[in-house]
Image (tube, coloured by chain):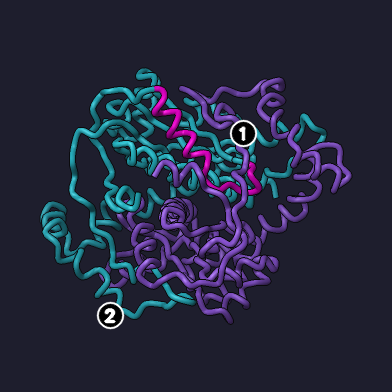
Chain colours: A cyan, B purple
């Protein structure tokens, strides 16, 4: 098991082989065994296998071909709608239309999503999380006909791998782990934590390709640019309000 | 592995046996192998083993004894501080001080957190996620000395189990999984999905104890009450602003 976790790679090229019905069901069962606040299961997993529908979602994911090439796309949503419906049918007044429950439902959803990813990889499948989900969450909600109280957080492309990428590097463990309290970084520590990555061949290639003096500027000037970040923030927060997660 | 996922139970009673250093390190390594947006690892795991400090965190978790009984408490935080520091040291202007990057960092953090939980359980340890983290996130941030750009999302109590609770029930898989698009529920479907739980012995006992006519009202009138939900929403959102995640 530990091996499954340690050897995770994002897969972006998939064979067209479908995932057997029984296998898919087992993976989804494993997802639902994750911890959930008060056993409320405040999430929905929308499993899209229909190719026409995945083709409709393709622009939402900026044309990333795995959306149509992988046989299965799972859109992971925070969902207070189902639980609220149950409450209303029992003369109980639901109060999950607020920010605390957006975060709580998102926690539920993401723990389940990671269980799904781990179960899939343990079964020999490959997965890739699609960060584009946040950028176009409103349009995804429209295509998937999400009711009020349901908001997309991420999506997982899933299928049999058609590539064997190398393991991605990570920062040294000391970068992300703090013992006892948060031990804030000195400038020298930051330099040290990023040193290996900054000196890698991959970084050198990226700098040459982008004509930029360092890796950080590839992030801030090419990959995730301020004006895009702010536009996504505004559109996602507006959707959150529309979905009824900000009545406070 | 599948078994590890399928047999998850939250553990709330722990032996005092410490987690060996090497084991803990392996679990944390497994956490960092989870998917992360652009390989940015926008999270921090604050591992608190010091008993005095855990005792200080106890009221933040409403006195739940596992905070002091389990040998290890991991506070899981969204963290754009470290990455922003690196950017600034490289003359790159970071732009992660906004809502989109709160959600992105939260996704990173929670995928890593679930990897940590799965790795721990696979190793024979028990875990419990502490939802109380959201209620008192500001105070937790103060105790753990979190800098601006770092916000707690959840915490995991971790150690060797001193109880063997039964597996918790879940809603039928059809409750949380939708095929192709979201298939909204009819009232009859909602009744059916909750039927088994509502008829259980546990529910009957809870109704008798609480003097309430149905399970939904235990949620809305006892467990998660509107005025508390709104207070938590306001305090967590205020913290999010203070932490610099809402400059948009």
Of all chains, the one bearing label 1 is: B
Residue numbers of the magenta segment: A21-40
At x 62% / y 62%, what residue is drawn?
B13
The residue depicted at 64 percent of the width and 42 percent of the height is: A40
Q: In the structure shown, which secondary structural element does the residue marked by tag 1 occupy?
A: loop
Quadrant housing residue B171: top right
Q: Nearer the viewer, mark 2 or mark 1?
A: 1
In depth, the one of B236 and A41 nearer the eye is A41
Q: Is residue A234 left or right of residue B200?
A: left
Residue at mark 2 = A188
Which SS class for mark 2? helix
In the rendered image, residue B190, in percent from the top left (x then y), is placed at 68, 26
The image quarter in which residue A217 lies:
bottom left
Left or right of B228? Residue A160 is: left
Residue A165 place in picture, x, y as percent: 19, 44
Q: Could one spot residue B190 in this view of the protein?
A: yes
């Amino acid at each position: 098991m530990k091996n499954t976790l340690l050897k995770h790679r994002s897969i972006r090229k998939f064979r067209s082989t479908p995932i057997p019905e029984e296998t898919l069901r087992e993976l989804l069962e494993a997802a639902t065994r994750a911890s959930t606040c008060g056993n409320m299961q405040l999430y929905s997993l929308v499993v899209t296998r229909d190719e026409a529908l995945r083709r409709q979602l393709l622009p939402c994911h900026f044309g990333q071909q795995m959306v149509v090439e992988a046989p299965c796309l799972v859109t992971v949503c925070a969902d207070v709608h189902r639980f609220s419906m149950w409450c209303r049918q029992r003369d109980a007044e639901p109060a999950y239309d607020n920010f605390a429950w957006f975060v709580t439902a998102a926690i539920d959803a993401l723990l389940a999503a990671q269980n799904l990813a781990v179960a899939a990889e343990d079964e020999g499948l490959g997965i890739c999380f699609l960060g584009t989900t946040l950028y176009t969450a409103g349009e995804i909600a429209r295509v998937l006909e999400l009711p009020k109280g349901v908001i997309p957080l991420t999506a997982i492309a899933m299928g049999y791998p058609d590539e064997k990428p190398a393991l991605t590097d990570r920062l040294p463990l000391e970068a992300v782990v703090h013992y006892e309290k948060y031990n804030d970084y000195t400038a020298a520590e930051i330099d040290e934590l990023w040193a290996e990555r900054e000196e890698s061949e991959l970084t050198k290639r990226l700098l040459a390709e982008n004509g930029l003096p360092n890796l950080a500027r590839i992030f801030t000037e090419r990959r995730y640019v301020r004006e895009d970040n702010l536009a996504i923030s505004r559109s996602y927060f507006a959707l959150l309000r529309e979905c009824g997660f900000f009545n406070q």
